[in-house]
Image (tube, coloured by chain):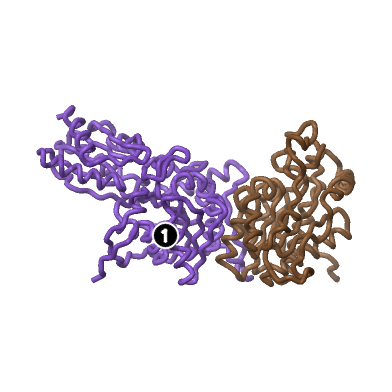
Amino acid sequence: MAQKELWKGNEAVARAAILAGCRYFFGYPITPQNEIPEYMAAHLPEVGGCFLQSESEVAAINMVYGAAGAGARVMTSSSSPGISLKQEGITYLVGSELPAVIVNVMRGGPGLGTIQPAQGDYFQATRGGGNGDYRTVVLAPSTVQEAADLTQEAFDIADQYRNPVLLLMDGMIGQMMEGMVWHEIPRRELPPKRWATTATEGKRGKNIINSWRSDGTGLEVHNLHLAEKWRAMEENEVRWEERGTEEAELIFVAYGTTARLAAAAMKELEKQGIRCGLLRPISLWPYPSTRLCALAERTSVRAVFTVELSLGQMVEDVRLAVEGVKPVGFFGRAGGVIPTPHEIAEQARAFLEQWR
Amino acid sequence: MAIIYAKSKGLTDKPMHYCPGCTHGLVHKLVAESLVELGELENAVGVAPVGCAGYAYDYFNCDMQQAAHGRAPAVATGIKRVLPDRTVFTYQGDGDLAAIGTAEIVHAAMRGEKITTIFINNAIYGMTGGQMAPTTMVGQRATTAPWGRDPSQCGSPIRMAELLSTLDGTAYAERVTVVDIPHLNRAKRAIQKALFLQKENAGFTFVEVLSICPTNWGMDPAGAIDWLKGNMIPYYPLGVVKDCRREGNVV
């Protein structure tokens, strides 16, 4: 049996990437994600890989583009303002159908904001973020263990669909140390990268990595091809965790750090005789809408309550999923402020009482 | 029947989209011939820019990546770090390289990336319709400088070969032009040398090619050549700006 080890979230993500076969990392310093590039700088050379500190986040994501196009497993990480700079490269990765893993250890915004944890980049992450009509799979861990596990799987997902995958953590998960176990992650069967620009060696025709389509019809054909991938992701990559949803009268919806706070708030409410459940989306896109709607439709459920480290972003997806079947409440703190479980419990109880 | 001259195997059969009189086609030919003559075509990965040469991925007969505007040196860095034995080159214009992509080209050179950059300096933004570039000459008219470039507002044109030569990572930088046969031959030797030094892992190599843009300069090709000779060459002197071998230093 594998031994439990104490790991910091950011370092666990970096080690997990190396275990998943990532050999190239390009990044730029920004808090609170610095332990990821620092770990990569120290450990990628041990496995024959390459760490490079770029001149900017813009350059880093374009180095990722080149390396991904050359057929390598490659990653970059940043925190909120730096992820904004990477959006150009992310939309090019999608347009050129290149796989890569991008980690966002979220901090407060807008602007320079704060280095404290936040979840204000939900819209940016789940709606594409860069220009054009596109999606990326967005995975949101709520423990260090899950961060390590999802990082490894993210590389397979990226390769399977030839599309970047975002790991959306908040600064709390990145910075805290927690017990975890290193265990085998099932690997997917993946097609060979025959499309990669590795030089022809005179053995095949030339490969081109490109997102440009010169005529409108050609681009629409390309967009529709990409949309088929989004449909497949919606079918195959939705994931969530549920706790205590049987017979619950109040369903919490929260992800990442906030899901842990909501779980603590549930205990407080249950002591007061309120039966609570939690739906924790793990994939923020594709979103577990169908499951959430099914839960909301249960007769025992009086209300749905969303908690976020923002002024209300994921709650829009919750409302879209619930479709007015039950009332949806929201409580959020922003700017790097973490609510206490008691605060959440009080807010949730007050909302529930309107509908009991 | 003897074949005296044939299109380089380094170019595809795709018809080029360049305007009449444009010199991009000539420079493509030189790069393609150089790759073939060095035996590197099948070992090459090129990076196309955004701008007039945006379709270069269709013209060079080797693996190609198309990069975001100005980011070709970063993309090439990613490729070369994964494939250190490949010949990796970027082909970029002056808006791409000397404006939006300044950080990427300077830092690729600073790191001494073992890549070759072919830089087309035609003193204008071509693809978007003749806007002022960082390389536009003082007094030269452009759609965004309707009374000519005013140095009190826009500064003086940037000399990229000289700028990059200040960096230790730059192994070779030369400025050439393609306005007549002697200069064309000199340009080809420069491109071959740059690619050769890349194979030798000498460092970053750079060839700036002074080019004409008859369409956006509003001139006929012959007039454009005269204008380049009379206005650009005095400001952008031709010749080797830096050669790590000539100086006897090994980068």
Q: Quadrant of the N terminus of chain A?
A: bottom left
Question: Which residue sits at x=57%, y=42%?
Answer: A217
User: How many numbered marks does the figure carry?
Assistant: 1
Badge 1 marks a residue whose secondary structure is: helix
Which residue is identified by label 1? A155
Rendered location of residue A296, percent (x, y): 22, 38
Residue ranking furthest to the top: A354
Chain coloured purple in the rendered structure? A
Chain that bears disc 1: A
Return the x and y of residue A335 as percentages of the image width and height: 37, 38
| Residue A123: quadrant of the picture | top left
Q: At which x and y percent is residue A206?
A: 62, 62
Residue B9 appears in the picture as rendered: no
Task: Give neighbour class at mark 1: few <14, some 14-19, many 20+ (Cα, 10 Å).
Answer: many
Residue B117 in picture, x, y percent from top left: 69, 58
Does the image show residue A337?
Answer: yes
Query: What amino acid type is highlighted by mark number 1?
Result: Phe
- Name which quarter of the figure residue A246 lies in: top left
Which residue is rendered at x = 23% and y = 37% of the image?
A343
Q: Is residue B95 left or right of residue B81?
A: right
- Tell me which residue sits at (39%, 42%) in the image: A122
Q: Chain in brown? A: B
Q: Determine whether, in the image, residue A84 is placed left or right of residue A340.
A: right
Comparing B242 with B89, the one in front is: B242
**Quadrant occupied by the C terminus of chain A:** top left
Towards the viewer: A148 or B106 = B106
Nearer to us in this view, A35 or B195: A35
Q: Is residue A189 left or right of residue B207?
A: left
Front-most of A9 and A193?
Answer: A9
